[in-house]
Amino acid sequence: MTDIINYDLINEILTKIDFDKKEISIYLSSLELGEAPASTIAKKANIQRELTYVVLKRLEQKGVASHTTKDYKKYYCVVNPEELVKQLEEKIYLLKKVIPDLNEIKQKVSVKKPSSKSFQGVEGIKSILNLILNYYEKNPNEKEILGFGPSGYFEELLKYSLPHFINRRKELKVNFKAVYDESKKAIEKKKLPYSEIRFSNQVDSPSFTLIFPNHVVTIMFNEEPLALLVESKEIYQSYLKHFDVLWKNSKK
């Protein structure tokens, strides 16, 4: 055993496991003294006796200190350092037991409060397409993307990267079910792999919408392209109903 004690490190570690400065001082003093009355501990820790009683009571509530009575006088002692580790391990064990419930609460909150992110420019559009593909990589049981809007904009904006996106979608065997405007460029979409394409004159606005589980992406092809990603079960279901109506009323 080394004679050099790193009190700075001890203080740092004990602070991180929820000891305040006075609790550390009294714990270390009591650890060194063994079983002792509060007045002796107070003198050793250089803390007022009245305050020492208060701190000792806090330590008892934490399960770190205890006392016995001898000849009508209280003697205090603190747990061994190994017991501190056991207490932390027990807390970690208990916390792990409720992790599924805590995540369930988080999931419910995320459903109640939709989250949104915006992506700007060509690189932003690339990022959102990669995000969509990453979703399907992580959720291999999901096999369909829905979409509606005009044709030609993606090809013009993502001349070189769009084929890569289509190939990755093909590798993942994710079907693209979409309604396009009635144009020559749109008709060419029927050649896309893993795709079901229909046509409608109701999707001629300069924006394209992509729908995948619990997410809706709206891409606006302005001078500076902008995409808005919304994560919400309710909004997703609303767009799903809208797409179903659009699909039923579109041409093959």
Image (tube, helix red, strand yellow):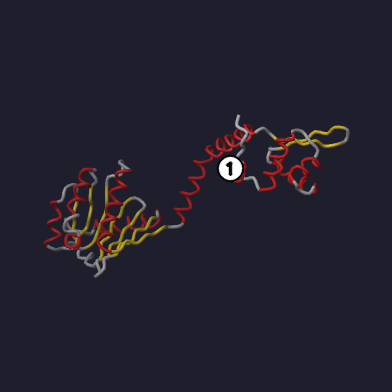
Circle 1 packing at 10 Å, graded few (<14), some (14-19), many (20+), is few
Q: Residue furthest top?
A: 1
Say which residue appears at 47% left-offset and 50% top-offset. 108
Task: List x then y, in percent, for residue 187.
Answer: 13, 58
* Location of residue 225 by image quarter: bottom left
Say which residue appears at 46% left-offset and 49% top-offset. 107
Task: List x then y, in percent, for residue 13.
Answer: 58, 42
**In this view of the protein, which residue sits in the foreground, 35 or 129?**
35
Q: Is residue 109 left or right of residue 197?
A: right
**Which residue matches tag 1?**
9
* Location of residue 16 by image quarter: top right
* Location of residue 73 by image quarter: top right
Which image quarter is the C terminus in? Answer: bottom left
Which image quarter is the N terminus in? Answer: top right
Task: List x then y, in percent, for residue 103.
Answer: 48, 45
**In this view of the protein, which residue sits in the foreground, 231 or 158?**
158
The amino acid sitting under disc 1 is: Leu
Q: Residue furthest bottom?
A: 223
Q: Residue furthest right?
A: 71
Q: Is residue 145 left or right of residue 90?
A: left
**In this view of the protein, which residue sits in the foreground, 171 or 37?**
37
Task: List x then y, in percent, for residue 163.
Answer: 17, 52
Q: Secondary structure at mark 1?
A: helix
